[in-house]
């Protein structure tokens, strides 16, 4: 669950994180979530309790669910469409992919010294990125306005949490009563989410995007 806790927080709140960045301001959400990520990583490196360690990983996953879409949205709104935006997105993608791969290698090396270093190292990175973001990210990335689709947020987040919990748990335990209940709950909540999104004025996810073939394929 040190691994699964992160996946649960990240997968469960990723779509909500993107919408909140639009509503509250991309720069503000990015910086706040970044600080929360760093603080949770610091706590994870200091604690001796298994429960608190797993909780710190869940919080890191939740924070990442807000930083990732906010960062991508900052890029798409800062750079004009065309060469500049394509170049920025390419750099973003390359660093994301190489960061993930090199992170696995670096974490293995750090663990051979002390596993706590895998929690302390991100704190230093977060500190540097936060300082850079204050300087580089424009203050013009303001909230877009609008209202939060609370019914959609509850059903989507609940459904995603239940779905991710099922996916990460069933290989270990099989379909226990709890896992089965989570799977059924995910289906019910996500089904309710689809129904609700067709009825609200400002949906969390505009279902019309699924008419775009490239998005459906992705």
Image (tube, grey):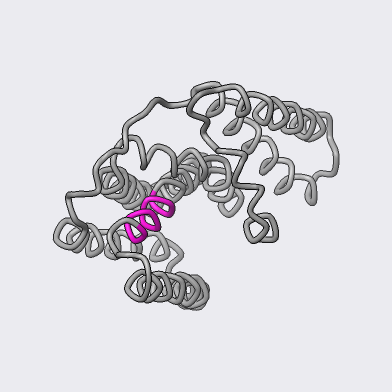
Asked whether, in this view, residue 155 is left or right of residue 48, the answer is right
Q: In which quarter of the image is residue 84?
A: bottom left
Segment colored magenta = 67-76
Q: Image height check: is 97 above or below 137?
A: below
Closest to the observer: 65 or 7? 65
| Residue located 16% across and 56% down the image | 134
Asked whether, in this view, residue 179 is left or right of residue 60, the answer is right
Q: Where is residue 12 in the image (x, y as percent from the top left)?
A: 57, 41
Q: Position of residue 36 (x, y in %)?
A: 33, 45
- For the question of whether residue 107 can be seen, the reply is no
Asked whether, in this view, residue 118 is left or right of residue 161, the answer is left
Q: Image height check: is 123 above or below 23?
A: below
Per the image, is 34 magenta?
Answer: no
Quadrant of the image containing the C terminus: bottom right
Closest to the observer: 150 or 142? 142
Q: Image height check: is 200 above or below 29?
A: above
Q: Of helix, strand and loop, which mostly describes the magenta segment?
A: helix
Closest to the observer: 131 or 192? 192
| Residue located 56% across and 38% down the image | 206
Q: Where is residue 18 in the image (x, y as percent from the top left)?
A: 44, 44
**Tag count in the figure?**
0
| Residue located 41% across and 46% down the image | 66
Q: Position of residue 61 (x, y in %)?
A: 48, 48
Closest to the observer: 29 or 114? 29
| Residue located 77% across and 30% down the image | 178
> Seen from this angle, which residue lies furthest left?
135
Q: Image height check: is 69 above or below 157?
A: below
- For the question of whether residue 210 can be seen, the reply is yes
């Amino acid at each position: 669950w040190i691994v699964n806790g992160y996946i649960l927080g990240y997968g469960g709140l990723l779509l909500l994180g993107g919408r909140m960045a639009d509503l509250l301001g991309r720069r503000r959400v990015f910086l706040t979530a970044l600080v929360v990520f760093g603080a949770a990583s610091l706590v994870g490196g200091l604690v001796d309790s298994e429960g608190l360690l797993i909780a710190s990983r869940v919080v890191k996953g939740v924070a990442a669910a807000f930083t990732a879409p906010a960062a991508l949205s900052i890029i798409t709104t800062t750079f004009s469409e065309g060469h500049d935006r394509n170049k920025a997105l390419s750099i973003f993608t390359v660093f994301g992919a190489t960061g993930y791969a090199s992170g696995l290698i670096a974490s293995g090396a750090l663990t051979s010294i002390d596993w706590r270093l895998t929690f302390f190292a991100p704190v230093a990175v977060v500190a540097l990125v936060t300082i850079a973001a204050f300087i580089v990210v424009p203050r013009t990335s303001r909230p877009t306005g609008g209202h939060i689709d609370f019914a959609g947020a509850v059903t989507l987040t609940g459904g995603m949490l239940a779905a991710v919990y099922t996916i990460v748990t069933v290989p270990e335990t099989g379909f226990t009563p709890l896992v089965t209940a989570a799977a059924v709950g995910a289906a019910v909540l996500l089904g309710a989410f689809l129904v609700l999104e067709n009825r609200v004025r400002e949906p969390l996810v505009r279902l019309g995007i699924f008419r775009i073939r490239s998005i459906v394929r992705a």
